[in-house]
Image (cartoon, rainbow, N blue to C red):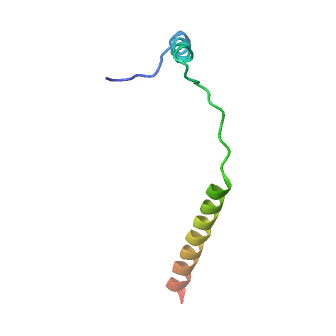
Amino acid sequence: MDIRPPETIEEELEIISQALEAGIDPFPPKKEPTRWVKLALGWFMIIMMVSWVSQLLFQYV
């Protein structure tokens, strides 16, 4: 089945109304990142920066 995006506003409103009738929230509230996600992303960025700096220093030393 090939799903195509709606071409008119009427088609998009029809899709939204069908979702609401089916009990689906088409605009769910945005989830805030948890503490663990922030911590993991922070450590990943630190490790990547240390890796890049060490590679750069290794080339010039």
Q: Residue at x 45, y 22 (%)?
A: 5
Going by the image, does 28 lie left or right of 18? right
- Residue extending furthest toward the bottom: 61
Q: Residue at x 63, y 58 (%)?
A: 36
Q: Residue at x 65, y 37 (%)?
A: 30
- Residue extending furthest toward the front: 23
Q: Tell me if residue 39 comes above or below residue 21 in the rendering.
A: below
Q: Nearer the viewer, residue 4 or 25?
A: 25
Q: Tell me if residue 7 comes above or below residue 54 in the rendering.
A: above
Q: Tell me if residue 38 comes above or below residue 54 in the rendering.
A: above
Q: Residue at x 51, y 15 (%)?
A: 15
Q: Tell me if residue 15 comes above or below residue 32 in the rendering.
A: above
Residue 24 in percent (x, y) is at 55, 22
Residue 61 in percent (x, y) is at 54, 90
Residue 9 in percent (x, y) is at 56, 13
Q: Nearer the viewer, residue 7 or 36?
A: 36
Residue 37 in percent (x, y) is at 62, 56
Report the quarter where the N terminus lies: top left
